[in-house]
Amino acid sequence: MEVTGQSADSTTTGAAAGSPPAARPVRLGPSPRLALWFLLPALILLGAMVIYPIVYSIFRSLFDTTGTTFVGVDNYVAIFTDSGMLTTIRNNLIWVAVAPALVTVVGLIFAVLTERIRWATAFKLVVFMPMAVSLMASGVIFRFVYEQDPDRGVANAVLTSVRDVFASGGGFPGARPRENERTPVVLSQGAVVTRQPVSPGQTVLLPLVGLRPDALPASAAAKTPGQGTPGIHGTVWLDFTPGGGGAADAVDAGEKGLPGVTVEALRNGTVAATTTTAADGTFSFPGLTGEHVVRLPQDNFAAPFNGLAWLGPALITPAIIGAFIWVWAGFAMVLIAAGLAAIPRDALEAARIDGATEWQVFRRITIPLLSPVLLVVFVTMIINTLKVFDLVFVIAPGSVQPQANVVALEMWRVSFGGAGDHGLGSALAIFLLVLVLPFMILNIRRFRRDQS
Amino acid sequence: MRTYKVLAVATGLTLAATACGGGTQQPPASGGGSASPSAAAKPLTGVKIEVAAKWTGQEADNFQKVLDAFEAKTGAEVTYASTGEDTGAYLGPRIQGGSPPDIAILPQPGLVQQYADQKALKPLSAEVLAQVDQNYTPYWKELGSAGGTPYGVLVKAAHKSLIWYRGAAFEDAGVQPPKTWDELITAAQTIADSGTPPFALCGASGWTLTDLFENIYLSTAGPENYDKLSKHEIPWTDATVTTALEKIAQIAGKKDLMLGGNSGALGTDFPTCVTQVYGQDKAAMVIEADFVAASALEAGAKVGEEAKVFPFPKAGDTDPVILGGDTAVALKDGKGAMALLEFLASKEGGEVWAKLPGYLSPNRNVAATTYPDDLTRQLAQTIISAGEAVRYDMSDLAPSAFGGTEAKGEWKLLQDFLRNPADVKGIQRKLEAEAVKAWK
């Protein structure tokens, strides 16, 4: 599209350059008839590949799926009434609001930081590299980067390893009481508590399930708590006999105790005593008298931090924008670096001699002098963002495609993705064109002003 | 942009085909006195045929071997192009542009009708019809016809009423393959108690959810209602649909029963879910069709040993048997295209394919002994002997805007249901609204 704009632009300036000689009585340049011949290839190409498709799309967008029934603006009404389409438009707004600004800022930072380092060219080459990869391939790469499983997705691998440095997971995530009416323990606000208060001398059984036996140490054969001594005694164990067949809520041979579990004894809702289980899962509160509720607090069962659901409905758009920045930051950097090299040094020197700090020089001199370049990058990115398709198509899994959808993808999907509704697809194409057009005009006008 | 993907896929395939062309290639089966591979017996030398189908990976490699056998027999040059998941999206522009592939293998019978309406299909030649009449029951011929004219040959059938499980996980939990839906739920709970998430659902691939729904629906509502719902003669707000969705919610409503809970299930596509059961040993069961075998083998599980299977349990009065299948159609004239269709419809072509894993032939003359393992032999027998008592995959009979488009219609709404299984009525209303739009 940019190419089109430029060529249209050069065509008009070419025509303008040709007209003054034509006004003179003696013509020095070629005849208008000849000029037409020179223009013809461009006109044919533009007509066949730009003008005709646009006009036909407008025409087609006024018809229904089959292309035979005139429906007026119904397709356009559908765009703004369907809830899925509204999500799509909302996503495009998020993209336009966030992505171009971020790409420009990141490009600016890279350009400024690498301006005077020794290996600048090598560094720039590396940052520019993603541009050499097709967007489809970038999408595939980031599909893996954002994988939920930290063993496969590098994003979550980084997050979990950073997190593990500060808080190491422990305990028995996934362990829970069996789901039936007879079991003596129940889940209450994430903690496991006994259904009834227990009194000293009573055997407290805390059977849990939902863990694989091989996740426990081999030595941890569960034992029924000892009797005879005063106080509260009990066992926390994995109440599942491998291979099935064990009795529920009873310590069977082959079942394993849970070692190192924190156990609390509660009296009237406050913690009266705390202990941890031994290797065989037994625990005891020797000094307690009276009725207590025994509780295994929630942090025994805290699920390990498994990273973020990058590809889930909530984070999918930010995640894809991240991939977009990875692709385009190099392009922005190269353009901005070129602009940076063209800034007159004496302006910067003068400011420094006048006592400006580096930040002031950057903020008050560099940025204003760079603004034309920054604007070009920014507007180009807005156009790219509005047209984004490949990254969304590849990165978002099928189940979150509706939440990640953008106008260009929706256009393709309704036209060719099974439904074959070319009417609605054309309407979306025209809608997209209307969105892009102001920025195209802005860019073309800038080019023209730069040339004059 | 689309071109990039197709190109990339095509390149990948060429590489894969080249890579496996050497050692693993089996000599083409010579079915009943077929021509010896001498130059004189190759009537199609120099003829180029392009075939487009959705298969990738192992399935594409296997199909390539069938094409190799055809090339060796006839001397024709066959190129394979992958259409990706959206066959319609790939073929539509090529048909409109006037340069379709010679043969396309359509994943849905609805597409046969659709393309026949567009006059994009070539009717089967007499030779192909002779093969079809000889090798197929009338039911399959009907599926490939539009307006009474036969256009398609069903070349590959899929048995969609299966649940695959990992034997070790069942042994650890001490459960047996269930016969009824209630037994299945009880067994799943026991497996969850044993510390293994029972189901690896492939929620990111919407079609796996429609398969699950259809099995339950056929079983609970019966074949008559199934036919009616397939044609949208009863609304999706019907009580029979409520019953089926509530059965799904028995699994989807309990995050302990799914690997990774609801969000994990929605983030997993097919065949990743198969890998979770067999390669990674993370879950116990995956609910999908016979073609799981190919992915299970790839994950290192031997079918019949680690990878076992039981029929989809009865959730109501009917034992569900649902089939999918791929129909080959000709989009261009030429003897090459018809010769390849004839080969695919023949006993000879079917038996080349049947030797490879993950393939079931609807061809009744393909000997059951041809299949590589007991399981496939048994499945082939059920399809052929069930005849017209089976039902075809409902979502594939629906307009593809409703039953066959990623992120739209039934696929999207069943994914929404998996995300929030409490809202049965709301999903039914949305399904009905989408169905009304698609069937108008």
Image (cartoon, coloured by chain):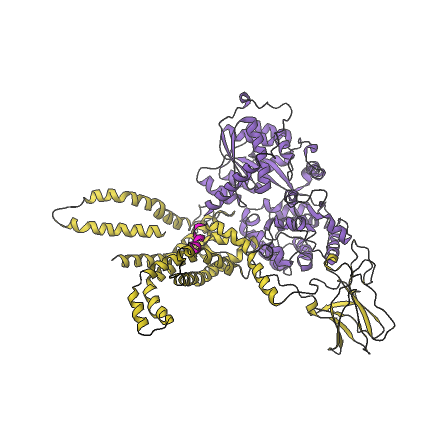
Chain colours: A yellow, B purple
Q: How many marks?
A: 0
The reply to whether the magenta stretch includes residue A129 is yes
Dividing the picture into quarters, in which one does residue A329 lie? bottom left
Residue at the limit of the structure toward the top, as seen here: B40
Instruction: Determine if residue A386 is in view.
Output: no
Residue A25 percent across, percent down from the top left: 11, 48
Residue A32 placement (x, y as % from top left)? 20, 45
Position of residue A130 relative to residue A161, above or below, is above
Residue at the location (21% across, 51% down)? A17
The reply to whether residue B372 is in sight is: yes
Q: Position of residue B48 (x, y in %)?
A: 49, 31
* Identity of the residue drawn at 35% across and 56% down: A440
Q: Main secondary structure of the magenta part?
A: helix
Name the one closer to the observer, A166 or B185: A166
Residue A164 in which image quadrant: bottom right
Q: Which residues are magenta?
A: A125-133
Image-based side of B104 in relation to B297, left or right: left
* B59 over B265 or under it: above or below: above
Looking at the image, which residue is at 41% across and 48% down? A60
Outermost residue toward the left in this view:
A25
